[in-house]
Image (cartoon, coloured by chain):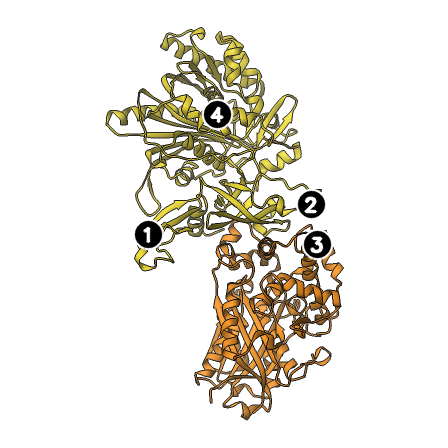
Chain colours: A orange, B yellow
Amino acid sequence: MTIKPVIIGAGRTKFGEHYDKNPEELIEEAGLKALESAGIERKDLDAVFISDYFLQVTNKIGIEEGFISELLEVNIPMETLRSFSSALNCACNAIEAGRHEVVLVGGIEKMTDRLDKIRDDLMMLGDPWSYYAGGTPEAFHELMLRNYVKKYEIADEHYDKLMKALAYISFKNHEYGARNPLAHFYGRRISVEDVVRARKASRTILGLYDFAPISDGASAIVVVSSKAAGKYADEGVCITGRGSATDYISYFSRSIKCGFKATREASFKAFSEAGIEPSKIELAELYDQSTLMELVTLEDLGIYKPGTAWEHVYASYENGKLTYTVNGLENYVNTNGGLKADGNPLGATGGAQFHEIFNQLLERAGDRQVEFRSKNPYALVVEIEGFGTKSYVYILERWKP
Amino acid sequence: MSSEPIERRVSYIADKLRGSECTLCGRKYFKPRDYCGTCGRSSFGKMRNINFFYEKGVLEVCTIIRRATNKFKMLEPFIYGIISFGDIRVPGRLTDLIVRDEEEFNPSKFEGREVVARFRRRCSTGPVDIVPTSSLTFTFADEYYPYMEYKVFKPNRYADKPGIVAYGLYTSKFRIREGRMERSVPFLDEDAITAAVEAGKIALIQAAIEGELIKKIYVGSESNPYAVKPIASKVAQVLDLGEDIGDGVRGVDAIDTEFACKAATSMLKDAVALAKYMNDEGEDFYAMVIGADNSQAAPRWAPGGELDFFVGFGATAFIIGNRDVIAEIEGWYSCTSDTPDFWRRDGQKYPMHGGRFTGEPAYFKHIIKAARKLMDKMRLQPKDIDYFVPHQPNVRFPLKVAKRLGFKTEQCLPGLKVGNFGNLYSGSSPAGLIAVLDMAKPYEKILLVSYGSGAGSDAYLLTVTPQIIEKRRRTEKFNVEWQVKNPYLEYIDYNTYRKFKEGI
């Protein structure tokens, strides 16, 4: 039997501004919660993979592993990566290779400690040449929207519908986020009109409510080998397919500009590995750094045809549903609130996505619990680094010993 | 950016939009690279240097940035987008564009339009940092600064005497109008460095020669943003002057000069002398002489504030050589005295002005002496000369000095442009000369007399050649007449003018 990675525990902090806390305090909280959720002790761990996008820039923290070693008082192998999904990818590789059995994957970001310089830093890391030309993080999304509108010739009333569809994505994610006590915008509902008004107020193409916020936070999960999982847990979430891919650092020089080639490549690999069609996905956690990113990712994954996602999303808005309809069936997307409402502490964001899928698949999501239509539902996570520079796609299902 | 090596590498590419082309398959890249992705390892060492600096691009998509990153805050709001040159794309900011608050932003108004690269300051920096530059800055190809093709021809005819081979005047799109006087005002991202490059670029397009033939570059300025670091090195790098001797180094001698408003004119004779010497040695030689200024003036209520009524912005460039000369330099005379009528102490932002003292014992005395000495030397009377072009700090002085020398107002008016551009300082009398060259007929004679405070004058006698007719056609889209009056000039108020002058 092939070895599969199984998530047996997940923990996270609240996302938002943690003015009083050091990064290591946040990761400690998330890590302890994950260990508790998995019911294991730190001495059970074989290795730790942690992620932070730019703690070295925001907090001038160098060797993150040393902090974790000191917190856990262990001397096991540890590695730092840039995103939660890349850390998890390394953990999965190690588990599947039989190198480690029990691995802690954690993510942390402390963005508000450097709030006044954060957009310059994000741009410099995101694509230096766009930064040199005057680009902003928001401009990436707006230029992609312009490319989308031009390529698919969306004009007049169709353009208005597209913009409404995008506004609805923000509304929907806030609706879910409002029910998530750990979300950045817990209890904060907005209307579609609020999104539109914000664009008008700033006199920009996309507005305040089209973008995910700047957040602090930490998240962690415990991943074990399916061979040994039975020792620690009687249920879990199994990673049945995964894929990752990269694309050019400069958006302007990429071949595909109305979506992300990296996501298309990664999802192809993930679906092939899982042996399922995109239509089998009942719950997805997508990387909605902007409302547009959720929209184009629906197309990149093959859930909707390129250039048509907005029509389906608009239909959900018209019908007042918090789900997207695919082939007549209801699909849930970003039930934690997405990056938009849950928050976006880069290195920890992916952890919150897996935290949500873990709890949803195991029916532990409280009043956000979705009703799965099949007995063995599939869920999916997409995490992206930079503006589509790297993409990770994971397909998950329930696991029993 | 506080890292000099990073700044050097970034501006080296960005200033000229440098790239590579595979000589095997013709695939092009923005940013130089060592091999082609299509041809793989077989293309190693077979990539050719290219640039998009003289090309026409298309603004494909754009958005408005009202909340910029910290380094671009001073430029808010601006339009930012992706520009394509065929299959190649670069990010870019539109410049020379004031986004009015009341206007709703409609990207499709801009998308699909042709643009040209403009060399500008890239973003803000601290007062001790290197001034970042780039040409990832664009304006529309059919507006104030039209696209002009840069097509290289082999140099042809040898002239009897070295002289002007080509010229270029650059003034900005913005103007302030007070009374009957108009003055050129830099956009926020312009300064003496950017103006110098723009003027040099226009001269090079008119000359239609490879930059590598130019082996000496002089830039005269009294408003270099640096106290120490030449403008000339930047011009040499962006225009690729002198032969490429590897590692980004070029075989060109570059030097900045400073003598108030005669920093550039003084070097014309040096360039001519060098050209003559090199020609006698049997070597093709060209020199470029630029006068570039964005002179600052104190606010009107402060000491030195009287200058605030006259400062302009712009640059002039001349290419001097032996071949395809459009105006031969027949003779010159220079004079100097230690007359402190205008000065700026080191570390001071604004210069001081001698008031009434700048007239008789300064401007008039030096210009009249230099002009008379040269006319005596050349055995010429004012009636033998077609055009008289003196330094022009205001409209009154040039006409007065012309009269005192015996010139008629008609001989002086064609070269009197201070009322259109303001005082261009190092480029002041050269701009007048360029205005005359734009309309002069072959064999006409021009007397140019500069004046630099401090003080001194350079007088030159020039004779126009028949080759001027063809040459000036190459840059006629952006000639003096166009820069004086065209539908795209934008008039701004005094507060905006002060803000633009201070820059980013």
The residue that disc 2 covers is: B104
The residue that disc 1 covers is: B24
Do the dots labelled 1 and 4 sit on one chain?
yes
Do the dots labelled 3 and 1 sit on one chain?
no
Question: Rounded to the nearest whole Å, what is the CA distance between mark 1 and mark 4?
Answer: 51 Å
**Residue A159 location in percent, x, y?**
67, 55
Q: Nearer the viewer, mark 2 or mark 4?
A: 2
Q: Are marks 4 and 3 in contact (CB under 8 Å)?
A: no
Position of B452 relative to B114 (above/below):
above
**Kind of residue at disc 1:** Leu
Q: Nearer the viewer, mark 3 or mark 1?
A: 3
**Kind of residue at disc 4:** Cys
Left or right of A30, for residue B284: left
Of mark 1 and mark 4, the one earlier in the sequence is 1
Q: Are marks 3 and 1 in contact (CB under 8 Å)?
A: no
The residue that disc 3 covers is: A157
